[in-house]
Image (spheres, grey):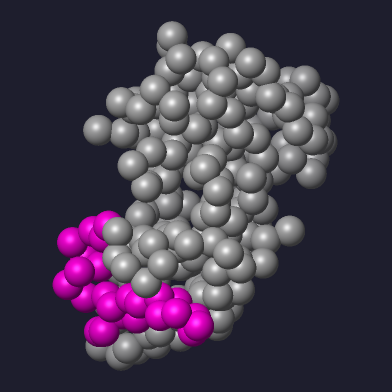
């Protein structure tokens, strides 16, 4: 069945260092959409990035991700972490009227 | 900005009490999802609707929860008899268009004492 795996539950890094949050998935749908949602404390989760196009980089607010269907991956990256990036990040997959979420990665950026 | 409205933001119930949460989806979005975000921050799918019809739901929802999405009224999720393990943030999200993108409300945080 469909599933999303985020292997890191917590990522802690120093401001200014690059960010990479891993996301791999399983799906039978060739046209599935992959998403990254960000959830700041006391706010509603919101969409950060989405893609369904193989090998095409998508960018928003300094973050980027490239969907690689060959490796079933959609890793989230940023060149330089900011303190304000501290939040929960969820990778998600849409298919069959469902949205499948990974367990989330807590990103903590320290000064 | 999302216009999914969830009420109440917070509710506190005793074990065995009913707990009801409401959601007004974004206008024009025919599909509504309910998720439970547990203390481990994991999103657990509960139920979804397309227009007023249930599309999918998990066993727990079928047995202890009741949910509806009537036309011209808010969607609702009600726990018939709250248990301590139900303490969580309940997120409503609506979806429109073809991409599957969800628009979330701010959630209703339930505490069961």
* Camera-nearest residue between A89 and B67: B67
The residues colored magenta run: B56-81
Q: Is residue A31 visible?
A: yes
* Image position of A93 with respect to B94: above or below: above
Report the label total: 0
Quadrant (top left, top right, bottom left, bottom right) of the C terminus of chain B: bottom left
Residue B100: image location, x then y, percent: 50, 44
* Image position of B51 with respect to A93: above or below: below
In-image side of A14 versus B69 (left or right): right
* Camera-nearest residue between B68 and B78: B68
Quadrant (top left, top right, bottom left, bottom right) of the N terminus of chain B: bottom right
Residue A47 lies in quadrant: top right
* Camera-nearest residue between A32 and A45: A32
Residue occupying the point 37% across, 64% down: B49
* Image position of B58 with respect to B76: above or below: above
In-image side of A52 versus A6 (left or right): right
In-image side of A104 versus A96 (left or right): right
Residue occupying the point 32% across, 88% down: B18
The furthest residue to the top? A70
Residue occupying the point 50% across, 83% down: B72
């Amino acid at each position: 069945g469909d599933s999303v795996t985020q292997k890191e539950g917590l990522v802690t890094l120093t401001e200014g260092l690059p960010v990479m949050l891993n996301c791999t998935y399983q799906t039978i749908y060739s046209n599935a959409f992959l998403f990254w949602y960000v959830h700041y404390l006391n706010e509603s989760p919101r969409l950060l990035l989405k893609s369904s196009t193989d090998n095409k980089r998508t960018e928003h607010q300094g973050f980027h991700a490239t969907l690689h269907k060959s490796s079933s991956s959609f890793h989230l990256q940023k060149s330089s972490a900011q303190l304000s990036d501290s939040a929960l990040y969820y990778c998600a997959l849409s298919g069959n009227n469902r949205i499948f979420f990974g367990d989330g990665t807590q990103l903590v950026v320290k000064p | 900005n999302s216009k999914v409205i969830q009420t109440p933001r917070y509710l506190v119930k005793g074990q065995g009490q009913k707990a009801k949460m409401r959601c007004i989806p974004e206008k024009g979005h025919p599909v509504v999802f309910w998720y439970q975000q547990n203390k481990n921050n994991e999103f657990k799918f509960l139920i979804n609707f397309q227009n007023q019809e249930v599309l999918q739901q998990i066993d727990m929802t079928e047995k202890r929860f009741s949910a509806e999405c009537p036309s011209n009224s808010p969607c609702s999720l009600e726990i018939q008899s709250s248990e301590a393990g139900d303490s969580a943030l309940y997120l409503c999200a609506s979806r429109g268009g073809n991409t599957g993108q969800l628009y979330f409300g701010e959630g209703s945080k339930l505490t069961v004492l």
